[in-house]
Amino acid sequence: MVVGGIQWRMLPKDFPKWQSVYYYFRLWRKAHQWQRLHDPVPGFDAAKNIKGRKRHLLVDTLGLLLSIVVTAASTQEREGARLVFARLNGSGKKLRRLWVDGGYRGSPLAD
């Protein structure tokens, strides 16, 4: 990347078409999403004994990104999941099954 920049046509074969990747890259750059992903105030997760950020992702079965929320490490997983679903703006109505990490399980989130 230092020498040739980002060569969009040379993305790995398991990525979507380079035009799609480039489209979302530009969309997120214009909306300052990259900066927003970087800027949340780091916190401390006492359960995992780590300081920093948590990234809450919702992807489909192909691994394509549907929603992402970055929070302080001190944010509970269930709260992060609520924020992820809130960002869907109703577009996730067809979701029928979710596979989640153990921290996301429990009745408050299931409800």
Image: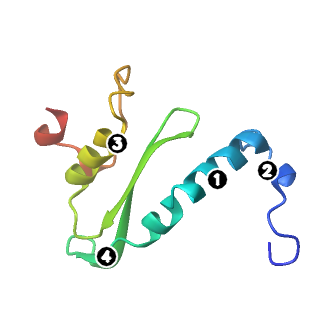
Looking at the picture, tell me which residue is in the foreground, 70 or 77.
70
Q: Name the residue under label 3.
A: 87
Label placed on residue 41: 4
Q: Name the residue under label 2.
A: 12
Alpha-carbon distance for marks 3 and 4? Answer: 20 Å
Relative placement, left or right, of 30 versus 68 is right
Q: Of label 4 and label 1, which has the lower sequence position?
A: 1
How is colour applied across the structure in the image?
rainbow
Q: Of label 3 and label 2, which has the lower sequence position?
A: 2
Alpha-carbon distance for marks 1 and 2? Answer: 16 Å
Q: Which of marks 3 and 2 is in front?
A: 3
Alpha-carbon distance for marks 1 and 3? Answer: 18 Å
Q: Residue 56's x, y, as percent?
A: 37, 53
Whether label 1 touches label 2, CB < 8 Å: no
Disc 4 residue type (three-letter): Val
Disc 1 residue type (three-letter): Phe
Q: Of label 1 and label 3, which has the lower sequence position?
A: 1
Label placed on residue 45: none
Q: Residue 36's x, y, as percent?
A: 43, 65
